[in-house]
Image (cartoon, helix red, strand yellow):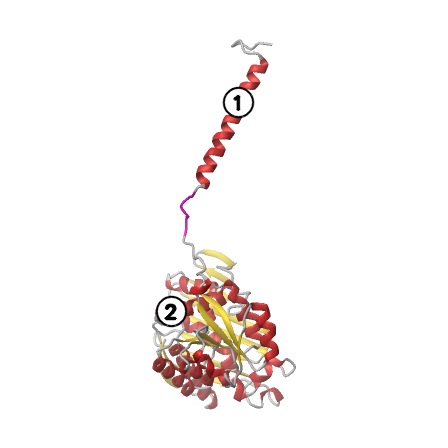
Amino acid sequence: MMDRNGLSRRQVLAAGAGATLAAAGASRAAAQVRAEGTTLAGDFTFPEPPGQRMRWAVVGLGNYAVGQIIPRFGDMHASRLTAFVSGSPAKQADLGARYGVSRFYSYTNYDEIAADPEIDCVYIALPVGLHAEYTIRALRAGKHVLCEKPMASSAAEAEAMVAAARQANRQLGVAYRVHFEPNNVDVLRRIRAGELGTLRHINADHGFNATFDWPPHIWRLQKALGGGGSMYDIGIYGLNTSLMMLPGDTVDWVSATYSTPQNDPRFAEVEGAVEYRLRMASGISVQGSSSYCYSPYFSRQCYFGSAASAAMQPATTYDANSITMDGGNLPQRTFRAGDPTSQFAAQIDAFSRAARAGVPHLTPGEMGLRDMRLIEAIYRSADAEGDRVMVGLAV
């Protein structure tokens, strides 16, 4: 059968097949050209080679270190884990096998880290009452130190830690991970951008139900190890996170009252709860509560502005933080700006880069010292049945 151009059906099919093969060949050729190399779009951060990363020792192998800090080293780009300090050889052996760590120190030979070239930085994950001693010893050993919050049991201890860092010419940071948590950082960005209008008030409530039945709670209820009461452990999240949103402001005065259940055996050494208020020089007020009596675990930050509000509940957890925006001519919406679990790797990598470059860390020892002074002022006010305590501390 011939078509109008005098071509047979077989010729037409052959011509069509040839065109298809030619097109496929051209497509493969184009793909081969593209596969030879293209320009990357976007900003990529690649992990540094292991030999160039800052080397870390973790001091204290309790629940937080084992459950949160140590596993996150696998996500880090500028840091790697090289040593453990613990009073438990069994823990060290087990964790060493899991994470490829073979350098072990005890609390008795801790000072020998000074001669270990495989340790640049130390993460202090001990109970609060031990922070000052082991931070200062690490600084004197020539190591940079990132210390868990709160940095000490008292402002006097915190001052000694800051002084030791300056004398040793080493970095000292406090592990305020919220400064690296993407949802809290996003709220800070929105406040700075004016999305809430003029910020008027901050409310912060944090707490959990402490019990002698769970070992990680026991030392928190002992003043010598816990450093103090609930403000040292859980309330400090609300205090520090609120001040994170107020850079450049000044705390003029604080007031506070206790709200501890009567005859509760848990609170023989520390208070059950404390309610506090900070008056800022800008006129903004920060009102918060810190409790060992809330159930279930509670973590809330609310920011009220002249045009809109932002609420976070939960606000400072390891993995569940979210944001609810209301106002600003938009319907209420709840969302996440990023994965909360990224805060751990981001915090330690940021410290590694600051230590290597010799520049201040985002959450330095001086910030921890400021917070210790504020916490002590809060307790002084509560001891005086709510009297104002003038502080005049710059944020």
| Image location (x, y in percent) of residue 56 | 47, 72
Q: Where's residue 86, x and y in %?
A: 55, 80
Q: Residue 158's mark?
A: none
Dominant SS of magenta comes to: loop
Tell me the number on the disc at residue 356.
2
Amino acid type at circle 1 is: Gly
* Total residue callouts: 2
Asked if disc 1 and disc 2 are in contact, CB closer than 8 Å, the reply is: no
Q: How crowded is mark 2: few (under 14 residues within 10 Å), some or many (20 or more)?
A: some
Quarter location, residue 161: bottom left
Q: In which quarter of the image is the C terminus?
A: bottom left
Inspect this view and state whether residue 254 appears. no
Q: Which of 296 and 305 is in front in this view?
A: 296
Within the magenta stretch, is there residue 137?
no
Mark 2, secondary structure of its residue: helix
**Mark 1 = which residue?**
18
Per the rendered image, the range of residues in magenta is 37-42
Q: Earlier in the sequence, mark 1 or mark 2?
A: 1
| Residue found 51% across the figure and 59% down from its top | 336
The answer to which quarter of the image holds residue 114 is: bottom left
Give yes or no for residue 38 being in the magenta stretch.
Answer: yes
Residue drawn at the location 37% of the way across and 80% of the way down: 165
For label 1, the SS is helix
Tell me where residue 249 appears, x and y as whole percent: 35, 74
Question: Which quarter of the rendered picture does the N terminus lie within?
Answer: top right
Would you say residue 276 is visible in this rendering? yes
The image quarter containing residue 278 is bottom left
